Image (spheres, rainbow, N blue to C red):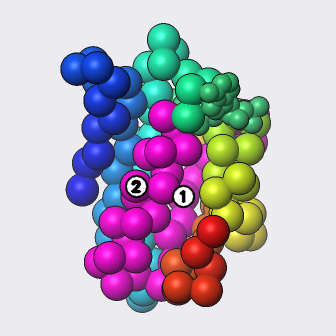
Amino acid sequence: MRFLADVDGAAAGTASGGDGESTGAAALTAMWVDPAFRRAGVGDLLVRTVVEWARAEGYDRLFLWVTAVNLNAERLYSRNGFQRAGGSQEVRPGELEFEMSRALHPRSLR
Ligand SMILES: CC(C)(COP(=O)(O)OP(=O)(O)OC[C@H]1O[C@@H](n2cnc3c(N)ncnc32)[C@H](O)[C@@H]1OP(=O)(O)O)[C@@H](O)C(=O)NCCC(=O)NCCS
């Protein structure tokens, strides 16, 4: 499911939620906010929307991958309850990305 953030008729950002191909887990992918609309809470809104989508679909966990140098994105995900989940892989030679995940059951609501 792809979500688009609309700000006064303009497409300000997007994020997707899909099946994570592991039992009970959904994946958050394709997270992007137009530079003209950054630092205004659009990223938070998109993450929260995918969290709500995944919970409504009945998933237990939501995970994503973030590159090691993308501190803005890692802060956004940490603020929304994600923690590094242990997995890491090389996206390009010399560039690592890390898995982050969070639980979705009701008591993890923030
Ligand atoms: C990472 C990304 C999605 C963040 O989007 P965003 O819309 O800027 O996110 P938010 O506005 O929710 O939060 C960003 C910052 O703005 C701050 N902010 C939120 N609302 C604000 C407001 N009204 N006024 C001032 N600052 C605000 C947040 O506190 C946060 O601060 P921090 O980075 O110092 O912690 C965006 O930078 C992006 O698209 N980057 C390129 C693509 C990318 O890296 N995608 C992720 C791949 S894993």
Give the magenta part as a residue range.
Answer: 42-70
Q: Nearer the viewer, mark 2 or mark 1?
A: 2
**Percent of width and height locating residue 26:** 41, 71
**Percent of width and height locating residue 87:** 68, 66
| In this rendering, position of residue 57 left or right of residue 42 | left
Q: Quadrant of ligand 1?
A: top right
Residue at (64% x, 52% y) in the render: 77
| In this rendering, position of residue 77 left or right of residue 44 | right
What kind of residue is marked 1? Leu
Q: Residue 109 is drawn in which quadrant?
A: bottom right
What kind of residue is marked 2? Thr
Name the quarter where the N terminus is drawn: bottom left
Q: Which residue is mark 2?
A: 49
Residue at (44% x, 45% y) in the render: 46
Q: Relative to 59, does residue 76 appear above or below in the rendering?
A: above
Q: Which residue is mark 1?
A: 64
Q: Residue 72 is drawn in which quadrant?
A: top right
- The alpha-carbon separation of the residues under discs 2 and 1 comes to 14 Å
Residue at (34% x, 66% y) in the render: 53
Residue at (48% x, 11% y) in the render: 36
